[in-house]
Image (cartoon, rainbow, N blue to C red):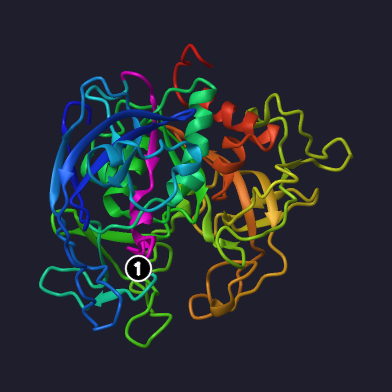
């Protein structure tokens, strides 16, 4: 928060280091430089299973702290800290970063929130930090530690008031990856096109039950997989009270997390490795399965869609994939206003939103659906999708591959979770309304990439329609 003190934890074998601070906007803007600070080296904690060359992902690494005051006049936003090793003039002579230098090691990001919420905007952008921590391998440029929720995880049996599951500390190093891929291009587009937004993290939403109250629209962007119960309850209450949500994301709210250790770590009972067992079941922190095999609260009751009825693509992230786009339905809906897209209701071939771009994936969510006599896809609601959910765009995932160990096209559920597919799998874009607010879902992780890089005029216009309709009074730049 502006006017507060930022606490950074740094370990280095250099005698000194300095820190440059940048704000993500239409460009990466240098705002300050601090230091030099004395360098102190700390060794990484060993893995509790004795795995050679792999540090523990489960404990606080206890690196030395340094305190940096945040000036009162810093704008709300996402900021990048770039750590530069070296003494005096040598460090100051290091070249400045630009947008191409956001990703990398020796970097960390943080959020600056305004002292008076919603003063500059009624749109709140939630950075999916729990998901970032789940995938953070604690690597550095010259060392692959491979210590995360996915690489050499640590499982605890629980008991004595502690939840069972894989334990992960959020006080670990790692560098910046996902921010550069999903968030940076979308944030740049927002500022370039005149949308003022304010920002928060998953932890902010978890800890503050009143965080959403002054806002009209919450944005979930990119890959938003890990949610706490408090997060979900507060977003649900926000919508019920008249708030709006745009899930420009996918694989959203797939796993539940339990915050521990003064909210510096979390535990989640996932299907990741436990000893020699992989996948581990029943994986009780999966939201959609009934208790005791899961939480018993399907994520699509909030989002409208689920990875259960969607899928992911093969190969290394972000992966290659089809570029057919979403087949448009209900082109007369306000979401499509000004796009010029057709849905085929005039007897012609329906248009595709995002055709020619990698819009669908790399992970995508869907809703259980059937087609009516006219061929229009309609949500059935059997999977928890709200009755008012309207499918606006659909892309059938075909063929489906349900082998857990060879995840290709199709959904994430292996036969151990769901012995037979309950219906066709499809990336699904749509929205639903309640007596209070409206929830839009893009159904794909890469919506903010296509919009942010302005790769498709239709995706850009749909995004503007959502922000303008659901985000409260327009700012002067829109």
Which picture quadrant has residue 123?
Answer: top left
**Residue 151 on the magenta segment:** no
Which picture quadrant has residue 420?
Answer: bottom right
* On-image quarter of the N terminus: top left
User: As displayed, is residue 177 above or below residue 27?
Assistant: below
Asked whether the viewer can see residue 221, the reply is no
Q: Which residue is mark 1?
A: 149
Of all residues, the one furthest to the top in this rendering is 476
Q: Is disc 1 placed on a helix, strand or loop?
A: loop
Asked whether the viewer can see residue 99, the reply is yes
User: As displayed, is residue 315 above or below residue 111?
Assistant: below
Q: Residue at x 60, y 37 (%)?
A: 453
Q: Nearer the viewer, residue 96 or 299?
A: 96
Q: Residue at x 30, y 36 (%)?
A: 92
User: As displayed, is residue 31 above or below residue 388?
Assistant: above
Q: Which residues are magenta?
A: 119-148
User: Predominant secondary structure in magenta?
Assistant: loop
Across and down, in percent, residue 317 comes to 55, 61
Across and down, in percent, residue 392 comes to 66, 42
**Residue 138 on the magenta segment:** yes
Of all residues, the one furthest to the bottom in this rendering is 276
């Amino acid at each position: 928060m502006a006017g507060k003190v930022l606490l950074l934890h740094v370990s280095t074998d250099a005698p000194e280091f300095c820190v440059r601070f940048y704000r993500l906007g239409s460009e990466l803007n240098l705002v300050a430089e601090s230091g030099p600070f004395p360098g102190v080296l700390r060794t990484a904690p060993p893995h509790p299973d004795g795995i050679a060359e792999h540090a523990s992902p489960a404990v606080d690494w206890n690196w030395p702290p340094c305190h940096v005051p945040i000036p009162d006049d810093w704008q709300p936003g996402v900021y990048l800290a770039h750590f530069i090793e070296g003494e005096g003039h040598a460090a100051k002579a290091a070249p400045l970063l630009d947008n191409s230098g956001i990703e990398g090691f020796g970097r960390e990001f943080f959020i600056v929130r305004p002292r008076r919420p919603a003063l500059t905007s009624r749109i709140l952008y939630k950075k999916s930090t729990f998901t970032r921590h789940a995938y953070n391998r604690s690597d550095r440029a010259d060392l692959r530690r491979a210590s995360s929720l996915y690489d050499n995880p640590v499982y605890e049996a629980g008991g004595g008031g502690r939840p069972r599951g894989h334990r992960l500390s959020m006080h670990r190093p790692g560098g910046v990856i996902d921010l550069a891929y999903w968030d940076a291009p979308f944030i740049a587009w927002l500022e370039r096109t005149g949308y003022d937004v304010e920002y928060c993290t998953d932890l902010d939403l978890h800890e503050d039950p009143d965080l959403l109250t002054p806002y009209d629209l919450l944005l979930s962007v990119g890959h938003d997989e890990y949610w706490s119960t408090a997060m979900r309850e507060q977003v649900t209450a926000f919508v019920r009270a008249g708030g709006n949500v745009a899930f420009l994301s996918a694989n959203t709210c797939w796993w539940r997390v339990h915050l521990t250790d003064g909210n510096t770590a979390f535990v989640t009972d996932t299907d990741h490795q436990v000893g020699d067992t992989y996948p581990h079941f029943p994986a009780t922190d999966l939201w959609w399965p009934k208790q005791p095999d899961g939480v018993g609260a399907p994520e699509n009751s909030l989002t409208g869609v689920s990875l259960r009825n969607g899928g992911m693509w093969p190969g290394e992230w972000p992966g290659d994939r089809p570029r057919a786009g979403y087949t448009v339905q209900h082109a007369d809906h306000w979401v499509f206003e000004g796009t010029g897209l057709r849905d085929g209701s005039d007897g012609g071939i329906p248009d595709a939103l995002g055709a020619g771009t990698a819009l669908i994936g790399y992970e995508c969510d869907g809703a259980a659906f059937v087609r009516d006599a006219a061929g229009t896809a309609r949500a059935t609601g059997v999977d928890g999708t709200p009755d008012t959910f309207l499918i606006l765009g659909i892309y059938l995932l075909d063929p489906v591959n349900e082998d857990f160990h060879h995840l290709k096209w199709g959904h994430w559920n292996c036969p151990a979770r769901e012995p037979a597919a309950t219906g066709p799998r499809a990336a699904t874009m749509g929205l639903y309304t309640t007596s209070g607010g409206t929830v839009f879902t893009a159904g794909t992780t890469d919506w903010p990439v296509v919009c942010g890089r302005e790769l498709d005029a239709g995706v850009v216009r749909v995004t503007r329609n959502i922000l303008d309709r659901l985000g409260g009074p327009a700012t002067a730049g829109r």
